[in-house]
Amino acid sequence: MKSKSKLFGKDQLWGYSFISPMLIGFIVISLLPIIATIIISLTNWAMLNNQVNFIGFENYKKLFADPLFYKVAKNTILFTVLLIPSNLVLTLGLASLLKDNFKGVGFFRTAVFTPVVTTVVVWGILWKYIFQTDNGLVNTLLSMLNIKGPQWLYNAQLAIPVAVLVTLIKGLGLNTVIFIGAMKDVPAMYYEASEIDGASKLRQFFSITLPSIAPSIFLVTIITMIGSLKVFAQIDTLTEGGPGTSSFVFVYYIYQQAFKYYNFGYASAISAVLFGLIMILTIIQWKLRKRWVYHEN
Amino acid sequence: MRTESEKARRAKKIKKVIRYLVCSVIAVIMLFPFYWMFTTSLKTYGNVMKFPPQWWPNPITLDNFIELFSRHNFLRYLWNSVYIAALVSLGVVIVSSLAGYAFAKIRFKGSNILFLIILSGMMMPIEVTIIPLFIALSKLNLANSHLGLIIQPIFGYCGAFGTFLMRQFFITVPTELIEAGKIDGASHLRIFSKIVLPLASSTIATLVIFTFLQSWNDYLLPLVLLNNSKTYTLPLGLKLFASEMGVEWNLVMAGATFSTIPMLIVFFLAQRKFMESLAMAGLKG
């Protein structure tokens, strides 16, 4: 009895020493900074202020009266609303097309996946070139059809949709491969049974495939939402937030306020709001995942 | 009867042709931007501006690439990106496999709550912690070093995800294996390094691919921290190069091509593992 408790005691020590590098690092690199972000958001810390004072929720009051903040929120919502449905429709279609084994399927899957492993900055710069007003590829092709292409990246209405398109094409491969995996897990007997009943392929897709992979669809949706909240490199390479402020998104606004104007207090308030949103979505994601897919304890 | 089956066969054939057609169109849409990038990087400035465009560069020139290496630091950027991503991957594997093993196989007080706490690191991405990190690193005079770029992912999002992933794997390792090691008098460290870790090679490969790509892609943190061209990583160096070159797209595309090729080669060598790993990370991350 005594030796057992001793063994357990020794185990405890091993347990703590095994987790301590990660735990200590996490506290210093993630936990303290997030607490600091919230504390700084309650101050007037800025380059121009000699004295840093606590000002309560002033930054938040200012934030919720700031038209640019509403624009940022609107742009981020627009980005998400445009991205998610188009992404789901296209990736579900691609996955249905590429899930079967036929000759050359490996090549097509690789082709769709190649942009996923391309650096966001490279991808953004490449598409900035493609969407140039003069001699960009898109407008060149349009002019061959005698259509005068718009100023894609310098048009306040088009900047966000173009950024969405660029993000969409880059990310297609990832969700396609996720859905192929999910579709392959659907028991073949479901399809066999429905075939005997004479169901069409389309009917099978809506009555068998979609309900069976619904958990993956929900998870992918939430993960894509979190990704949309964090969008930065695409915007910075394509439009630098412009024209004017018309493609400002959350992280771009944080970047501008914190590292161009050095308004650390105000930028921290934006960060804290972003953190709140990411936290809510992450908790939903964990709850869903626990309930549905992976039977984690 | 015969005509029936003939009809069915013909319908099948048509379906097959349509499928290849659709797939080919998609492949062209996905790959043409890369073709455009590569070929533009081989054109002269005059030919980039031509209308109608040159679909194939003529003459082919390597001057753009020579400029990257002679007047700009692209080789240095590449080296910086590679060694930073390698150290980040190594760090994440060590730290998160240790923690993952402990959470899966060692009984200690508070392990459940501590696991949740570390997991919460996944909701604290760099985008929301960057202001205090920048201030702290500047005060320590470390902003312009690579330390932040290496440490942050290890203990931030990547490390938290890694701990989760490794724990998931270690749970599936039979406890008898560990008990047997204990009876032989081996310590947890020995059991971990000699028995359990070698079993995890596939999961570790997944984690390395995910982490390496995250670090390789990292843009916001280098942009905020670094201000000396000797310390730039590829994405930051390329972005600033592109801003400087403006409409000299032949040069910009040469930089983009150079930044893309190393990762593309690795990807083509291990496509299946890349796709599996990133899909898994995408679903769980």
Image (spheres, rainbow, N blue to C red):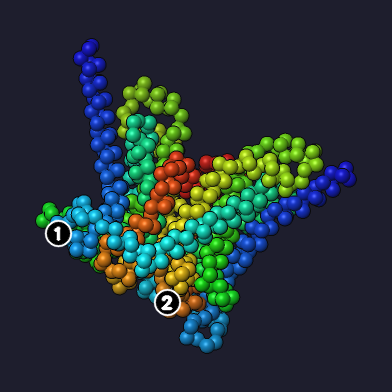
For the point 33% across and 69% down, the residue is B243
Q: Nearer the viewer, residue A100 or A283?
A: A100
Q: Residue B72, labelled with which disc?
A: none
User: In the picture shown, does residue B107 fall above or below B123?
Assistant: above
Q: Local crowd at mark 2 within 10 Å, few (<14), some, or many (≥20)?
A: few
Using the numbered discs, state the Cα–Cα distance from disc 1 to disc 2 in whole angstroms.
39 Å
Residue B169 percent location from the top left of the image: 60, 42
Q: Hey, what amino acid is under mark 1?
A: Phe
Quarter containing the C terminus of chain A = top right
Q: Secondary structure at mark 2?
A: loop
Mark 2, residue position? A260
Q: Is residue A157 visible?
A: no
Q: Secondary structure at mark 1?
A: loop
Q: Nearer the viewer, residue B4 or B22?
A: B22
Q: Hey, what amino acid is under mark 2?
A: Lys
Residue pushed farthest bottom?
A: A50
Q: Is residue B67 visible?
A: yes
- The chain letter under disc 2 is A
Residue B281 percent location from the top left of the image: 50, 48
- The chain letter under disc 1 is B
In this rendering, position of residue A244 left or right of residue A182: left
Quarter containing the N terminus of chain A = top right
Residue B236 percent location from the top left of the image: 41, 65
User: In the picture shown, does residue B56 fall above or below A197?
Assistant: below
Q: Are marks 1 and 2 on the same chain?
A: no
Q: Local crowd at mark 1 within 10 Å, few (<14), some, or many (≥20)?
A: few
Mark 1, residue position? B51
For the point 40% across and 24% down, the residue is A192
User: In the picture shown, does residue A262 fall above or below B110?
Assistant: below
